[in-house]
Amino acid sequence: MRIQSMFKDDINRKINGVVKVNQDEKAVLVQELNEYVITRELKKHFHSFFTNYVSSFSEATADIGVWISGFFGSGKSHFLKMLSYLLENREVDGIKTVERFRQKFADDPGTFELIDNATKGKTDTILFNIDIEGSIKKDQTAVLRVFAKMFYKYLGFYGEDLKVAKLEQFIAKQGKTEEFRRVFEEKNGASWLETRDTFDFIEDDLVAVMVEVLGMSELAARNWFNGTETVETSIAQLVSEIKEYVDRQPDDFRLLFMIDEVGQYVGGDTSLLLNLQSLLETIGSECRGKVWVVCTGQEAIDEIIKARENEFSRIQARFKTRLSLSSSSADEVIQKRILLKTEKTGRELENVYTTNDSVLRNLFTFTDAVRDIKGYSDAEEFTKNFPFVPYQFILLQKVFAEIRKHGNSGKHLSGGERSMLSGFQEAAQKIQDKDQYALAPFYLFYDTVHSFLDSSIRLVIERCERAADNGDGIEPQDVNVLKLLYLVRYVDDVKANLDNIVILMADDIRLDKIDMREQVRNSLNRLMSQNYIGRTGAVYNFLTDEEQDIQREIRNTSVNISEIVNRIAEKIFADIYTNKKFRYEKYDFAFDQMVDERAVGTQTGGMLLRILTVATDPFHKEEGRLMMESQGKAIMVLEENQYYESLESAEKIRKYIKHQNVAQLPKSRQDIIHNHQEEAGKSEHAASDLIADAIINASCYVNGEKINLKKATPSL
């Protein structure tokens, strides 16, 4: 059975995976409205919103703020847009929006009744993305100016320029709008609405119209036109105009400013937050529930202001309605819009799970991962998510959030260019020709974000792809491993160690995990040898071009073997064996200490404990030789693990940094070097643990005999 044929809806149909509040083409709107999934969580949010909103019809309120929060890609914009269409009860393709939603709330008649009651009167919404409509210059009145711009646009005025908008407003109050437009077209030859955005270049025509229609003198008209003063507005003035407008409407009329991306726009900027707070307070106190403000942000309002809670306590009070979209809601939407199976497929997949239950449990066992990073719990979960795995929903949302912070080339990703929905659809399409045993490896999600990443990331992947195509020391699978390592680079929930990488690369239920482990290990080795990735202890990490340059320089830094052996000796006899005497029954015996060929401390000629590391020539570790050389002394041959490499890595980093004038380097290089300093500390710490393990599992020779020591700690 092909994956493509499993789904109830065509996996290749066009889906608007990214909802933009300013996108209003009919076909797009029809799909967005029809396919909008009301999850269990969203039902609660609709109920909370409409309960508070409807109460303002019977009792005036100043608590007119709504804050919708949720991680990147969680569906905040879609929720905001659906609220807007519901509130206006807009007719799309001949059907009213409330009617479209009737069936969606069939199992929740109480909430639908609230929606129905809330939309009986006339409601207008001013829906916009503040990041798009707002000024690039974010001064202390930036929020006010974008509110003014959008309000004037809503009234039909030219909100892009307050000077023109105020002129149009004045003309409207005179009741001369139609006359003004007619006379302007007679004199200019083009309509006013088409020309007003270039009014700077039509002085003579505009002055003539103002003289004829408004009765102004030519001098007064030219003085207005050439006036250099900037037209400003205040919060009090704007809110007064908004109040004046809504007071002219029927008593049950409501106006809502519905603003996407407010959290990202204001961020932690004190002046912007104060501007928003003052605006919200004034609208609330003056308009008394007839005007509402609904905002979205990735963080809850409490998180944005937590560092200055006292200063912004009033903004919290105004945003009384707070709705938070969680990952479970995104999961449910993807399961219903993309992954919903036919009944026949459901039965077949349940059989696949039942047959392979133990295999799947064994396959998705992560090491050092947080609790919710897991595989399937039962057949129902397998059927719902196939060909995806539950951990991927949680991990991808965190990947998106981290890429937005660290790895994208600007506002594209944060502006909603990518979504969980499009990511899962595109990944499913890539494996649609496979069968019921196929699984979606996590690296498939890389292509969803590739074009929005910073060039320093893309160039690394593209160079690796070219090397694979040309057979320059890289295999095709290595590229997929590299993509995977980039995706999880900033995510702490899953450590990118060998075992976890194998799980994340799993592409079939029937895969041989031991064979896959060897393949991945070989890929990692090739990527490391070509400097595409680095490693700290057991954890692998993706390297940008600049990081690769520094990594290459560090790797080429020479460190003497004796320096590493000295560090091993310090770790053993200063950190692990802090007692310089060996206790036997009631007596303490001093002993000489030696690591490889290096004597540690003062030698007394008494008992000797000699420890052999991986740096010792294998010739000296031959069992017959050890039996002979251990006469009258104890020799411990450390188990071979990564302790030497960890210390060597730390030593190379420190030596490299010592020869750099770090303060004079560009900040990007300083940051990378700082990260390497932290890495050196981690490597040192890891080496201590590895040396302790190597001692516990060491081979010991005493007085010509090999002895077996069973112990859980490396104590003497």
Image (spheres, rainbow, N blue to C red):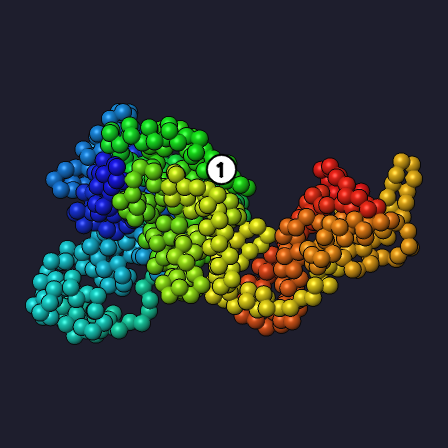
Is any part of residue 312 visible from this angle? no
Question: What is the residue that sits farthest to the front in this orientation?
Answer: 624
Instruction: Report the front residue among 396 and 148.
Output: 396
Q: Nearer the viewer, residue 332 or 563?
A: 563
Give me the residue at 49% from left, 37% from top.
365
Q: Which residue occupies the extreme left position in the image?
A: 186
| Point 68% across, 48% down: residue | 639
Q: Is residue 109 left or right of residue 507?
A: left
- Which residue occupies 55% across, 51% down? 539
- The residue lying at 81 percent from left, 51 percent from top is 628
Q: In which quarter of the image is residue 104?
A: top left
Mark 1 closeness class: few <14, some 14–19, many ≥20 residues within 10 Å? some
Name the quadrant containing residue 85: top left
Q: In which quarter of the image is the C terminus?
A: top right
What amino acid type is highlighted by mark number 1?
A: Thr
Q: Is mark 1 on a helix, strand or loop?
A: loop
Residue 124 drawn at (x, y percent): 23, 43
- Where, quadrant-wise, is the N terminus in this rendering? top left
Q: Is residue 649 visible?
A: yes
Between 333 and 700, the one nearer to me in the picture? 700
Disc 1 target residue: 365
In-image side of 532 versus 661 (left or right)? left
In the rendering, at what x and y percent does residue 456 appear? 43, 64
Tell me: 555 left or right of 239: right
Measured as percent of width and height from the top left, residue 154 is found at: 23, 51
- Residue 273 screen position, x and y as percent: 44, 51
Tally the numbered discs. 1
